[in-house]
Image (cartoon, rainbow, N blue to C red):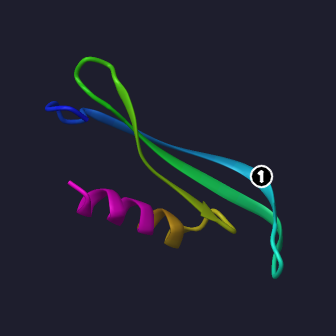
Amino acid sequence: MNTEREIFFHIHRCSFYLSEKKYSGKGALHIALGIDLVGKNEILGFWINKTESSSSWKLIINYLNESE
């Protein structure tokens, strides 16, 4: 985002059906959204995982912490 820092971020998860060569089943899409002081939204990242697990959440939070 321009010169302002994000003051709020939201991570949203939605489920979908995933079909690959080695895997078919439910998947989880995680989208991290940052919002700055003037209300502008920016996608900070998105991740596709086979499941919604604590390890996938940990990877996302660690990535966001390290990308300051």
Q: Which residues are magenta?
A: 59-68
- Relative image position of residue 15 (x, y in whole percent): 73, 51
Q: Residue at x 36, y 38 (%)?
A: 9
Is 2 drawn above or below residue 66 in the view shown? above
Q: Quadrant of residue 43?
A: top left
Determine the residue located farthest toward the bottom in the rendered image. 22
Residue 46 horizontal/vertical position (percent): 51, 53
- In magenta stretch: residue 13: no
The amino acid marked with disc number 1 is Phe
Farthest-out residue, left: 3
Which residue is found at the position 43% from the left and 67% from the top? 58
Q: Is residue 64 magenta?
A: yes
Q: How many marks?
A: 1
Q: Is residue 25 left or right of residue 2?
A: right
To which residue does mark 1 refer?
16
Residue 32 lies, in percent from the top left, at 45, 46
Instruction: Residue at 14% x, 32% y: name it.
Output: 3
Task: Label the magenta part by its dominant secondary structure.
Answer: helix
